[in-house]
Image: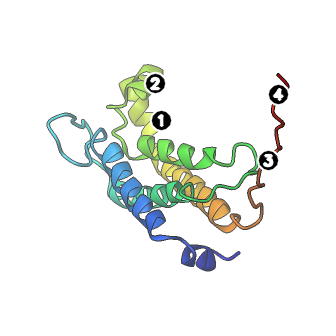
Amino acid sequence: MSLKSALAQWPGRRWQAATAAAALTYLVVAVPTDLIDTPLFSREIPPTWWSFPVLGITAALTGLVVATYVARMPASAPEGKERFGAAGTIVSFFAVGCPVCNKLVLLALGSSGAVQYFEPLQPLLAIASIGLLLWAFLKRATSEDRCPVPQPQTVASTPADG
């Protein structure tokens, strides 16, 4: 099935789920990374020019991946197939976040290590994040018609003697 024909078959509730999941993803990533300025969080290093496009693409792709779980789920999906979408969203959090504001990075590398080693890796994390999400979405959206859900067989029960 082509992507275009797969998307044409989506019911309205899938598009609603995609929109809601995209908006939620945008907020869940943007608020703690201080891409949306709130009094709750702050950044030591200003966001890069590519942080906002990466966040937008990540949110949109996450919404599309989530929508593939609405209404129709492949019964025999290969093990781990659904994990790539979640991994992509999590990786984007590290890609757009402040390198010295991330507690995990600070614990592992210290503040100078975060700037020296982690900050240059963030664009690669952004590419990996988008790649994982895109792969997960394409696999899920184009393979829905390949493995129909088996229907359970009902077994007639007989009344117990007694």
Q: Secondary structure at mark 1?
A: helix
Q: Residue 159 placed where, x, y %?
A: 81, 33
**Mark 3 neighbour class, 10 Å CA radius: few under 14, some 14 to 19, many 20 or more:** few
64 with respect to 145 (left or right)? left
Residue at numbered disc 1? 117
Disc 1 and disc 4 in contact, CB within 8 angstroms: no
Residue lying furthest left in this view? 39
Q: CA distance from mark 3 to mark 1?
A: 59 Å
Q: For the residue marked with disc 4, what is the amino acid?
A: Ala
Relative height, residue 140 to residue 161 (above, below): below
Q: CA distance from mark 3 to mark 2?
A: 58 Å
Q: For the residue marked with disc 2, what is the amino acid?
A: Leu
Q: Which mark is residue 109?
A: 2
Q: CA distance from mark 2 to mark 4?
A: 68 Å
Q: Secondary structure at mark 4?
A: loop
Q: Which residue is rendered at x = 43% and y = 20% of the image?
A: 107
Q: For the residue marked with disc 1, what is the amino acid?
A: Tyr
Residue lying furthest front in this view? 162
Q: Is residue 55 visible?
A: no
Q: Residue 149 placed where, x, y %?
A: 74, 56
Residue at numbered disc 3? 154
Disc 1 and disc 2 in contact, CB within 8 angstroms: yes
Q: For the residue marked with disc 3, what is the amino acid?
A: Thr
Q: Is residue 63 visible?
A: yes
70 with respect to 111 (left or right)? right
- In front: label 1 or label 4: 4
Q: CA distance from mark 1 to mark 2?
A: 8 Å
Residue at numbered disc 4? 160
Q: Residue 131 placed where, x, y %?
A: 58, 57
In the rendered structure, which disc, 1 or 2, sits on the residue that comes first in sequence?
2
